[in-house]
Image (cartoon, rainbow, N blue to C red):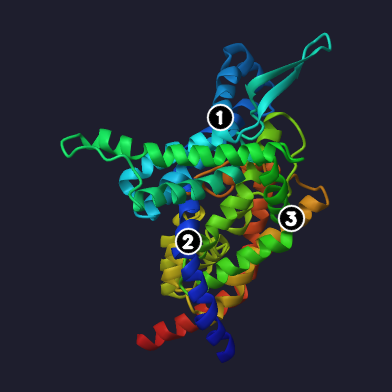
Amino acid sequence: MNKLDTFLNMKLLPLSQKMRDNKYMSAVSDGFTAILPITIVGAILTLLSVIQFAPYQAFLEITKLGMIFGYASKVTTDLLGIYVVISIAYAMTKKLGYEKERFFAAIGALVIFLLLLPTGAAEKLEDGTEVFVKSAISTEFLGAKGMFMGIILGITVPIIFSWFIKQKITIKMPAGVPPQISNSFASIIPIAATVLLFSIIRFGFEQTSFGNANKFIYTIIGEPLMKLGNNPIAFITLILVCQILWFFGIHGHLVIRPILQAVFTPLSLMNLQAFQQGKTLPNMITYQHIGTYTSLGGSGALLGFAILMAFSAKSKRYKTLGRMALPATFFGINEPVIFGVPLVLNTLFMIPFIFGPILMFVIPYLLQVFHIIDTLRGVTLSLGVPALAYGWIEGGFPILLVQAILIVVQTVVWLPFFKVADKQALLEEEQEV
């Protein structure tokens, strides 16, 4: 145990701190967080437009609400690559220490993103004739497929931009010129140089078998990452790291969130688009597997534990804590339990706290493998959506039922450990009396 403690304190904790403080990873995390309203609005309106209930669909058809709801996805989730590049570039420029220039760097990153999009679009008419528009911009890489390029450009363009600012290779205006105009002119050379550089890069990729930079990035980076994301062992490893960090008092989800967002958000978006089109959901694991399953009751899968404390505790300490924490835990907020028990460095509860979330993933994943339930729709939801309602949104009644079963499983898993702790707390209270 001493060797394990030494390893965790000397190796794992410093590494997690470095990851959390890493400006590149934190910029990606901040960028994804900033566009959360866009993804939530797009996902919810998409869900509202495709709920398969005949009277409801008839109502949408009569009122034309189905068409109205459908507009949102075209400019939200279908264009997520654009929002990703702007948001990450904005955050990255701030991390580099150039707050005044972050708007211009973000616009520059958007220009480069559009510059690298392939041109030319083919469409087959009803009579079978294929029409090719050479000057049209392809929409293939504006959504999920373009997110990987968006992340890369969101980081690299601000680095290039800030280098020019740091070296003072800018157009300097007289002292009396308003700051808005001065900052705009100062950005001309950095943006021009960046556009020229990436124009050369675009030309280079057009000479290769890939045809364009986006296809290269998606093939070399995007597809392997998505295969990794659909690997249950990789997902379990990330959850294990998250829970170990939580055990030592570090917000594990904040540490691994940039990885989760970069790898699993495109998978979620693909499932959502497939759901909207009535197709088979392609990805077995999405970002929503965390909120629906592994964090049912917050990180640590604590809802069952909170129920035990609230309704079966004999000690005043755990009964009071359970009744106070249960409402928050039902809405996915775990801090009252984690720091109220506390679970940090509490070896008695270490096993269910660290390995419980893994079990919460394994059970529904196996149900997916054996085609008992479908994978999740990939609807982006904010913190605070209650358990069961979360499951219904992500997969209808079957997923709601799975969540209910998992809550029972949580209760069973936590029960033997809780009984020991509750008995000990009761003895302590009797001794005090």
**Residue visible at 49% across and 60% down?**
254
Q: In this view, does 316 lie above or below 58?
A: below
Q: Which amino acid does label 3 sit on?
A: Tyr
The numbered mark at residue 244 is: none
| Residue wearing tag 2 | 334
Residue 248 visible (yes or no): yes
Q: How far across and down, in percent of the image, does residue 145 sit?
A: 65, 40
Quarter holding the C terminus is bottom left
Q: Residues within 10 Å of mark 1 (few under 14, many from 20)?
A: some
Dot 1 falls on a residue whose secondary structure is helix
| Residue wearing tag 1 | 45
Dot 2 falls on a residue whose secondary structure is loop
Q: Hey, which quadrant is residue 192 in on the image? A: top left
The total number of labels drawn is 3
Q: How far across and down, in percent of the image, does residue 380 sit?
A: 56, 42
Q: What residue type is labelled 1?
A: Leu
Q: Hey, which quadrant is residue 52 in on the image? A: top right
Q: Is residue 59 above or below residue 285?
A: above
Find out whether the residues at labels 2 and 3 contact each other: C-beta distance under 8 Å.
Answer: no
Q: Disc 2 to disc 3, how far (Cα)?
A: 23 Å
Q: Disc 1 to disc 3, how far (Cα)?
A: 27 Å
Front position in the image: 105 or 383 = 105
Q: Residue furthest toward the bottom? A: 2
Q: How far across and down, in percent of the image, does residue 382 sit?
A: 49, 45
**Image-based side of 75 in relation to 136, left or right:** left
The numbered mark at residue 365 is: 3
**Image-based side of 108 in relation to 350, left or right:** left
Chain-order first, disc 2 or disc 3 = 2
Q: Which of marks 2 and 1 is in front?
A: 1
